[in-house]
Amino acid sequence: MNNYFIRRLILIIPILIGVSLISFFIIHLIPGDPARVIAGQGATSEDIALIREEFGLDKPLTEQYFAFVGGIFSGKMKSISSQQPVIDEITPRFWNTVQLATFGIIVATVFGILLGIIAATHKNTFVDNLSMGFSLIGVSMPIFWLGLLLIMLFSVALNWLPAGGKDSFISFILPGITLGLPSAAIIARMTRASMLEIVNQDFIRTAISNGIPQKTIIYKYTLKNAMIPVVTVVGLQFGYMLGGAVLTESVFGWPGLGRLVVQSIFTRDYPIVQSGILLIAMSFVFVNLAVDLLYAAIDPRLRRKK
Amino acid sequence: MKKALLFSLILLFLVSLNFAAGDVVVAMNGDAASLYPADMTDNYSEEICRHIYEGLVEFDQDMNVVPALAKDWDISPDGMKYFFYLEEGVTFHDGTPFTAEAVKLHFDKLLAGGLRRSSLYVPFIESVEIIDDYTVLFRMKNPFGPLLNHLAHGAGLIVSPEVLKNYDKSEISNHPVGTGPYTFVEWAKGDHVKVVANDDYWKGTPGLDSINFKIVPEANTRVLMLESGDSQVSDMIEPIDVPRLQANDKVDVAIVPSLTVRYVGFNMTKPPFDNKLVRQAANYAINKKAMTQALFRGYAHPAKSVVAPKVNGYFETEGYPYNPTKAKELLTEAGYPNGFDTILFAAPHYQQIAVIVQSQLKDVGINAEIQVYEWASYMDLLYSKPPNESEHTMYVIGWSPSTGDADWVVRPLFDSANWPPDGDNHVGMDNPEVDRLLKLEMTTFDAEKRAEYLAELQQLLVDEAPWIFLYVQDQMVGVSNQLKDVMVLPLGVTVLKYAYME
Amino acid sequence: MERILEVKDLKIQFDTEEGTVYALENVSFHLNKGEILGIIGETGSGKSVTASAINRILPVPPARIVNGEIIFQGKDVLQYKREEMNRIRGKKISMIFQEPMTALNPVFKIKEQMSDVIMHHQKINRKKAVKQATEMLEQVRIPDPEMVLDKYPHELSGGMRQRVMIATALSCEADLLIADEPTTALDVTTQDQILALIQDMRKNLDISVILITHDFGVVAEICDTVAVMYGGSVVEFTDIYTLTKKPYHPYSNGLLKAIPPVDQTIEKLNTIPGSVPNLLKPPPGCRFHPRCENALEKCKIDPPSLTEIEENHFIACYNPIKGGEDNE
Ligand SMILES: Nc1ncnc2c1ncn2[C@@H]1O[C@H](COP(=O)(O)OP(=O)(O)O)[C@@H](O)[C@H]1O
Ligand SMILES: [Mg+2]
């Protein structure tokens, strides 16, 4: 078991090298000059040359790549736009994103699984249709619209919750729900389908014929088995949330990583873009690893023999 | 259990709603890049910096240059020496007294080069000299008309000498210390910058307890925050939201003309746009009034010069009224009776404008294919090569002079020495008469004379028609009506320096 | 003899998208206390549906019980409410299934699954329930019960799992054990062990057993009575001795002829031409008539009902084999 995870951890290295190469060359090969964009209109050629030189943008690409890799390890790489160390720019944003994503995935998982169970246990009834209709709306509603709707209701009309920013725990509620609901809908559908499949399994029939009460059958015997595919979906959704909740972050003025990276793509702030993408890739890999651990926790068949 | 949860949630709400009346939230569109004014190029930074720092002079609501840390000044008759007499008894937030030495140190850093705003001063200022503790002399390289405007620019906001001595340029941003009415507290990147009242402010206690500049990139959210009381000021309101906010009796909308002229530039180095008649024809083909109605519900006005009315030195010409018949005549005269095909370039946020321009040009026979480039690539398209080597033809863009002076429009955009990649003359203007007038307006510091040169230059430029002159947009800022004396500068920054709560 | 179970005229249909499946028709038999009843028939003849109906684990819908009674210990189980049924299942009627691979929950340890059942029925705590589970595993001759309890199903062999199933089913001293093809998926040696175990349990725990199989050898070995099913109906029901000696129904007869060696199974009956009926569209009259040598005109129109033609010998046939053929 330990060996397995050490192997997985080592595998991260080639993944990160690959991601760093791809993100580096894509962002460098598309047209656009960070010095020009950041210096802005009205900049003189000296202004631009100054920025180019300071950030090594006049060097050959390969040299810039190795400077970037070196910069990651030395921690001295700076944002072209703010001139602050990349690590100081990215860390707080990433932490904000992690917090929001965690809240979002909790919302998504709790609502999604509950809704999925309700739908599955009321299969083909009005309740089922209602839950699945609701989840269809959840999947197809633009985040933008959902977010603004929630602000209108809870901030403007009721004045219960702040419309934007990140001040206290209650700042999490609206963006968390906005981020979580579409995922909740996906998780609900997965839970329902998975539950309905498990209910038809032989071991559920065994449990029934042994007289196990229905509640135990649903919430223990079926649910735990049904969670196996759901965990994958939850992991994927969490990965997405960590990687790019750009819309939610914009609507709620949430100071997250996604917004920073997108904005930095527009200004061609290479160090931020490259490091941000690397961090996002890394969190994806770790979420995957966590999903594997969870799998093993749920399904003993996947545990490795010592 | 459930009750307890509900109770604690309600408690949390109450705690969060409980903010003091003097604490103001400003919802801004984007985050500051740097809080070192001499080393930043964006409006968001400037908006915040104008509360923490002050310059020798500053802009008032109408973009007049008025005294700030300099209570008065004298200019030598040849325009080569500026003497500034400083306010006494002013201290920086860190306790350092404000003296001539602080002024010198600040500008010496700029003049040494290497800062992102050095080029605002290096070409014109020879040196800054201390006459006595409260008198400084700016010695010029040559007479320069708009110097005061350049000093009122954000880059002229003076940083504490202690900070300048102790930190390198990128660290200064994290230690913003000025003489302004508000003291820096914290900067949560991407989220907010908070400042609190400077009780020792030399002009008396500021009107607000604190200001929290919050970054809210979504315009709809900024409006909703105003409505819910989550913000007292919301920058950059869309025209569509104005009527609703005006109907709200807790909110006012400040509508202020901006300094930005939006235009369609021509690459004048290549046919057919090397022909003045063609350029004029295109100008007559566009119904600017209809365009501003369609795009901005009237919160924009047809441009009648290369600069906006609030810019120092503005001269209003006749412009080009909508006249498609005349456009067709001019095209015929120019040798294009059946029009021609061309390309109209645009960045994504100019796409709507491009579509309208395209359809109106089509009416006179000019078939423009629209090509949209994302901003950084668009900059590349316009700036990486001289116009005669570049592939751009017609392109939608805008210009706003951050010094508030016409010089900062006409010189970068039309001086034949400023062709890309060295400057912003992407229309490829190369006109000796323009160059001559430019030199005159720049080196004349007599305001009246300078205004004459600028007027002549603007008339010439309108006649030359390097652009389709489109419009000058209004900027709209929503303000809680308890908040008084909020200055919305045409420059594009909102200043609460003198604001107070009623 | 005390009758523990009597199934009368059971008729069950399934409503499916393709149409109504006429799954059971005319199913009647009974079981005396302490005896083993074999139900034999080809795949698809309705054995599992019958068993599931007794334990009320048929999914309703799509299943629909059109008619019939299932009298268990004097009461019709079809009349019980769901909660009442939960007290009967596992406690009075237990069931084990063919598929030991999939019949245990893969994500819980044996300990947990067994003790859940025991705790539910006997209202005792987990510790006591585990202790009882250990004893039950000893009873089914598992050598190291503690170790097995600590395992997950996938860590056990098929035979081991079936033993666990039996131990669980019997852990609450059920009166009736329904074993639906308990040995089909097992290898021959294990099959014998499991059958021996069932016989032992019957003796030791004083239970009655319904043993469903399509292996006539199994029936002959351990059953007291036999119900032969064909196409969803019981066609013959009598004691094992009578059936092997003197089958009346042509189908039973064919069945017996088809099995030279004892442990041959009858997945498909080759000696009788034709194939099993499609229960979506069963033939009118006797469902066996298209394959029956003895078929009369009447057989094609009117389904024969199960009637006692000799004492304790029931057949559903208008034209039985005369006097029965001696099979020896
Ligand atoms: N859930 C169901 N839906 C529809 N038809 C079913 C269902 N369960 C059983 N049947 C039908 O009932 C008939 C009897 O099946 P079954 O009792 O499983 O046969 P076996 O004798 O092999 O155990 C089959 O034709 C089968 O198609
Ligand atoms: Mg079966």
Image (spheres, coloured by chain):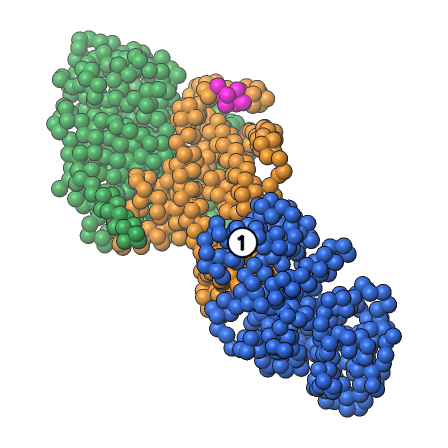
Chain containing the residue with disc 1: C
Q: Nearer the viewer, residue A148 or C285?
A: C285
| Apparent side of residue A121 relative to residue C46 in the rendered image (left or right) | left
Q: Horizontal placement of C129 versus C268: left or right?
A: left
Q: Colour of chain C?
A: blue
**Percent from the top left, x then y, of residue C55?**
58, 69
Name the colour assigned to chain B in the rendering.
green
Q: Name the residue carrying label 1.
A: C132
Q: Quadrant of residue B55?
A: top left
Whether residue A82 is visible here, answered yes or no, is: yes
Front residue of this view, candidates A117 and C311: C311
Give the magenta-colored segment's residue range: A67-74
**x, y percentage for residue A87?**
43, 26
Q: Looking at the image, which residue is at 75% across and 68% down?
A: C219
In this view, the residue in front, B117 or A188, is A188
Could you tell me how many numbered marks the image carries? 1
Most frequent secondary structure within the magenta stretch: helix
Q: Colour of chain A?
A: orange
